[in-house]
Amino acid sequence: MADESRFRARPEGALRCLFRGFDHGLEWVCMALLVSTAAVTLLQVFYRYVLNASLAWPEEVARWAFVWAVFLGMAVNVGRRSHIAIDLVTQHLTPRIRPWHTLLVNATITGISLALVVHGGDLVARSTYVSPAMGWPFTYFYLALPLGAALNIFYLLRQRDPGESWLFSGAAGVVLGACVYFALMAWGEDLFGDFATSSTLMVVALVMIGLGLPIAFALAFASFVSFVPEGDLLLMTISQNMTSALDSFTLMAIPFFILAANIMNVGGITHRLVALATTLVGHLRGGLAHVNVLTNLMMAGLSGSSAADAAAITKTMVPEMEARGYPRAFGCALTSSSGVLANLIPPSMGLIIYGALASVSVGALFVGTILPGLVMAASLSLVVHGLSIRRGFGRDTERASGGERMRALVIAMPALMLPILIVGGVRFGAFTATEAGAVAVMYAFVCGIAFYRQITPGNLLVSLREALWDTVAIMVIIAAAAPFAWVLVTGMVPQTIAASLGPLANSPTLLLMVINVLLLLTGLFMEMIAAMVILVPILVPIVKAAGIDLVHFGIVLVVNLVIGALTPPMGMLIFTTARVGQASVTAVFREVMPFLFGMIFSLILISYIPWLSLILTRIIGS
């Protein structure tokens, strides 16, 4: 995590204290907003089952608080210099060149922030309707993004490293970024008007991401450049799309599960699962690597969020693996790869979203994905075994006795009950996936207090703070991906590709092969949720016409897109583990390659052996 002192200004006396107080105050506001989203979600569950009543406002209040938490937190992350970026270029920069790169980053953030302030402010001014439950003007809903963008500039103006020339300070970046913004507004149509919008988008985004600029701002800036020739009205849609992308009750499950995973970490739950996994497989060659896979498999049933699991296991396992001789980048790569199991073992956020989009039973998807998830875990273990032999990793623990394994199981049992609570609650309609996330937060808290007794006010605050910043870093990319995806859709890029698959409906085998390639390529450039929203309505009629079972296809689709979370430039799980594990993103991408081959082999098995996805649904029923 970035050193907070790097973004604090260096004025003396009262002004310095004022800035520091503002920083802490804004952080507390963001944490309070995040906690309030979980609290009002739990309140809805309480009213439903305890008071046998319902409330109309909790979901709306939670969504608004979530949007404000993300966009205010975005600004503090700018100050902390902790937005996610690919370091392929930056790690090779010389000390003389690095300040110029920093200047470029600051200018880019300023340019898109000015666009969001100006055109987002225009959207605020034009908003006339009110929310249905609370009757709140949407003026205040859309205000979150331009205010957060203005705070981006505020934090940049304060950035200046000790001994740094004013030429490379944050203020200089703001001046340069402002010049870029006004130049694009004045001459952007002449520069880009002759190019296809989607082509401009792709080129600008890939170049900026490749240069190591923060991914969220690179995507948003590329969308801005693409819309400049179209005029002010379309420029407003950038802010509208970014805000609307987060106005999702389903998406709120992500911070809840991240928070639940962090509380599990400080509350002792994650450690109990690691201890259980260690007694079971720690004696194997490459034991801690096998423990990593098995722990992720068990954690997958707790959180449903790949990012949450990857963050939690990285904090717990990677330092221990490094101490036992495993390279830190290897530990992060393995944790990233094992983290995909959270979307293949119920509860899976990807499958829940697919079920809603394709009108497929979520219960059937949950049951159907159990065997494919185990196949993926087995393939990762086989890769671990092969790498352990090749790299000389030994046995990390002695073989545990039956009594030791039973004691570890009993101690971990309260944690292992959580998957039953979550999956059972969602499967039988007791609560939604987002409510399940809020319940997971409460359950993890209760376990940490009552069973494991390791939660203190201090570590609880730390877990909340880390959950907030991890959430913000991920959610801002999802928000920025929305206008990016919108440009692709308006340019008919995904529709054109999908329409070309229509003639393959007569050959399910060939169709699945082509769809797998399409989805793997899509995962390179698009976050899973955005890709599903765009492609599921297009692909489902085609696969249905080909006679492919929609439960089977949903699992195949999710497997493809979670593999995309490991591939550049959008490899979200790589960024998450590298960020939490303080490893080089490039080194982690390099280490993940063997695991990718194993996962693609599993994808082939899952794609062309449908009974892996369907046998349990036929036995258990949906």
Image (spheres, grey):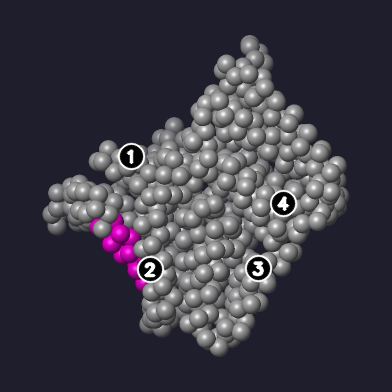
Q: Tell me how far mark 3 sits from mark 4, CA to CA.
A: 17 Å
Q: Is 371 left, or right, of 435 in this rendering? A: left
Mark drawn on residue 601: 2
Please determine whether, in this image, residue 7 is positioned above or below residue 306: above
Q: Tell me how far mark 4 sits from mark 1, CA to CA.
A: 39 Å
Q: Which one is in front in this view, the residue at disc 2 or the one at disc 1?
A: 2
Please determine whether, in this image, residue 189 is positioned above or below residue 539: above
Spot occupied by residue 463 in the image (x, y as percentages of width and height) = 46, 39
Mark drawn on residue 223: 4
429 or 91: which is nearer to us? 91
Rendered residue at 57%/41% (across/down):
212
Magenta-drawn stretch contains 411: no
Write down the region rendered in magenta. 371-385
Rendered residue at 59%/27% (across/down):
99
Q: Earlier in the sequence, mark 3 or mark 4?
A: 4
Q: Tell me how far mark 1 sits from mark 3, CA to CA.
A: 41 Å
Q: Earlier in the sequence, mark 1 or mark 3?
A: 1
Q: Which one is in front in this view, the residue at disc 1 or the one at disc 3?
A: 3
Q: Is 416 left, or right, of 553 in this rendering? A: left
Q: Is 355 left, or right, of 63 in this rendering? A: left
